[in-house]
Image (tube, rainbow, N blue to C red):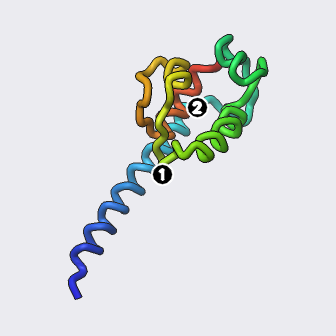
Amino acid sequence: MDTNIFQTLLLKLDDELADCMNDIETFTKSLHPDSFKKKRKLIHSARRIFGMKKASLKDLLDFWMPLWKEEGRLKGRYIVLPREEALLFGIEEDYKCDLYELCKMMCQLFA
């Protein structure tokens, strides 16, 4: 039995997991202490979307994740952003974005 295909797939998976761990570490270092659960003021455009003056990063993810999953836009650790969401972050429409990069961009939604 030839195991080359399985070895290649395992090496790709190992690379993907290593990249993911590095991204998590970078993202975690970019946050302020307790910023994942700490509520902060949102910028005006984000207030209109979420219907609240203050939110945490967790609140934003809790709002969006079910929607993304329901719409089938969440593929592994990547999400395709439609026009409205892309405009909010100042990026191009239908941009395929890494979730960790998106979480960094979500920090721009706080005043």
- Residue 106, position as x, y percentages in the image: 58, 27
Residue type, label 2: Leu
Q: The C terminus is located in which quarter? A: top right
- Residue 110, position as x, y percentages in the image: 65, 19
Residue type, label 1: Gly
Q: Is residue 83 above or below residue 103?
A: above
- Residue 71, position as x, y percentages in the image: 58, 42
Give the residue number, with chain letter if any, for mark 1. Answer: 76
Decide if residue 2 is on the left or right side of residue 98: left
Give the residue number, with chain letter if any, for mark 2. Answer: 31
Give the residue drawn at x 30%, y 65%: 11
- Residue 107, position as x, y percentages in the image: 58, 25
Of callouts 1 and 2, which one flags the residue occurring earlier in the amino acid sequence? 2
Disc 1 is placed on an element classified as loop
Give the residue drawn at x 52%, y 26%: 105
Decide if residue 50 is on the left or right side of residue 70: right
